[in-house]
Image: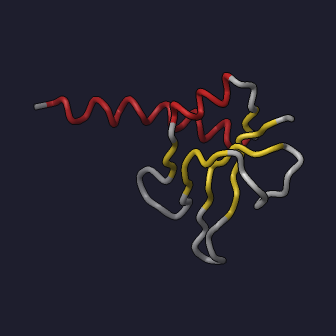
Amino acid sequence: MALKIRLTKVGSVHQPLYRVVVAEARSRRDGAAVENLGTYRPGDKGSPINLKMDRVDYWLSKGALPTSTMHSMIKKARRSAPAKVEAPAAS
């Protein structure tokens, strides 16, 4: 069973909302998912992607392959995650 980390669309026509899921490679785009890992809202300003990075790392360690789009989004989420952690420690 080959697993992929990919996007599945759940939003409406002019308000797209995508879920980041782990799914079998041969299943449909909006088919059954093994696990939901987060969301992606392309219209949001700031941080449009919310990911559970610990679960992403778990599935990557188990052999799940991200699609090319998800590979770049995971890289962006990793770069922005340390900035969020360091900001509250200024006081």
Would you identify the image quadrant in which residue 31 lies? bottom right
Q: Where is residue 3 in the image (x, y as percent from the top left)?
A: 79, 37
- Image quarter in which the N terminus is found: top right
Q: Which residue is drawn at 59% across and 64% down?
A: 17
Of residues 42 and 54, the one nearer the viewer is 54
Of all residues shown, which one is farthest toward the left? 91
- Image quarter in which the C terminus is found: top left
Q: In this view, does 3 lie above or below 12?
A: above
Q: Which residue is drawn at 25% across and 34% down?
A: 87
Q: Which residue is drawn at 67% across and 22% down?
A: 61
Q: Position of residue 26 (x, y in %)?
A: 89, 47
Count of marks, rendered view: 0
Left-right relation of 67 to 76: right
Of residues 78 and 9, the one nearer the viewer is 9
Q: Is residue 29 above or below residue 79?
A: below
Q: Where is residue 18 in the image (x, y as percent from the top left)?
A: 62, 59
Q: Position of residue 27 (x, y in %)?
A: 85, 52
Of all residues shown, which one is farthest toward the top? 61
Would you identify the image quadrant in which residue 2 lies? top right
Q: Is residue 3 above or below residue 34?
A: above
Of residues 1 and 77, the one nearer the viewer is 1
Left-right relation of 11 to 26: left
- Colouring scheme applied when the structure was drawn: secondary structure
Q: Which residue is drawn at 70% across and 43% down?
A: 22
Of all residues shown, which one is farthest toward the bottom? 13
Of residues 67 and 26, the one nearer the viewer is 26
